[in-house]
Amino acid sequence: MNTTKRDLVNEISSRTGLPQIETKKIVECFLDSVARSLIDGNNIELRGFGRFKIRSRNGYKARNPRTGESIEVEAGKKPVFEPSRELRKVLND
């Protein structure tokens, strides 16, 4: 089962007593801030939770398994999440 943004808004709203409309704005602003920070090349560290960062990916040659045709995959960047020790411990206990 996946947790959606709506689920997060409902959970935060019920725990804080804030209206869902305000909670949704806060969640969207948070996610937008995370994305903008990553776009600017900054890492985001949330103590006790984990770290979001950008990892560069080199270009490489791949093969289409159906046709056998060789294709060139361009270099790029991808977002990566590294959980904190505390989060890993909670998940494994």
Image (spheres, grey):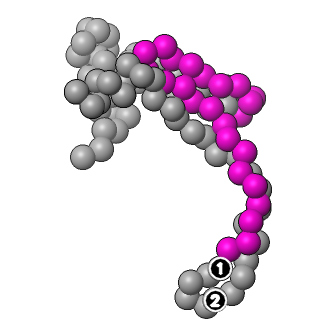
Task: Say if mark 2 contacts mark 1, CB within 8 Å.
Answer: yes
Q: Which mark is residue 68?
A: 2
- Sequence order check: which comes first, mark 2 or mark 1? 1
- Magenta stretch, residue numbers: 39-62
Above or below for 25 versus 63: above
Q: Is residue 60 magenta?
A: yes
The answer, for residue 33, to whether it is visible in the render is no
Q: Nearer the viewer, residue 91 or 21?
A: 91
Q: Is residue 92 magenta?
A: no
Residue reaching furthest bottom?
A: 67
Residue visible at 45% across and 29% down?
Answer: 83
Above or below for 83 versus 16: below
Residue visible at 22% across and 27% down?
Answer: 93
Q: Taking 74 as reference, is 47 left or right?
A: left
Q: Taking 1 as reference, is 83 left or right?
A: right
Residue 61 occupies which quadrant of the picture?
bottom right
Q: Nearer the viewer, residue 8 or 23?
A: 8
Residue reaching furthest top?
A: 17
Specify the amino acid type for callout 2: Gly
Task: Name the residue carrying label 1.
Answer: 63
Residue 20 image point, x, y percent: 32, 20
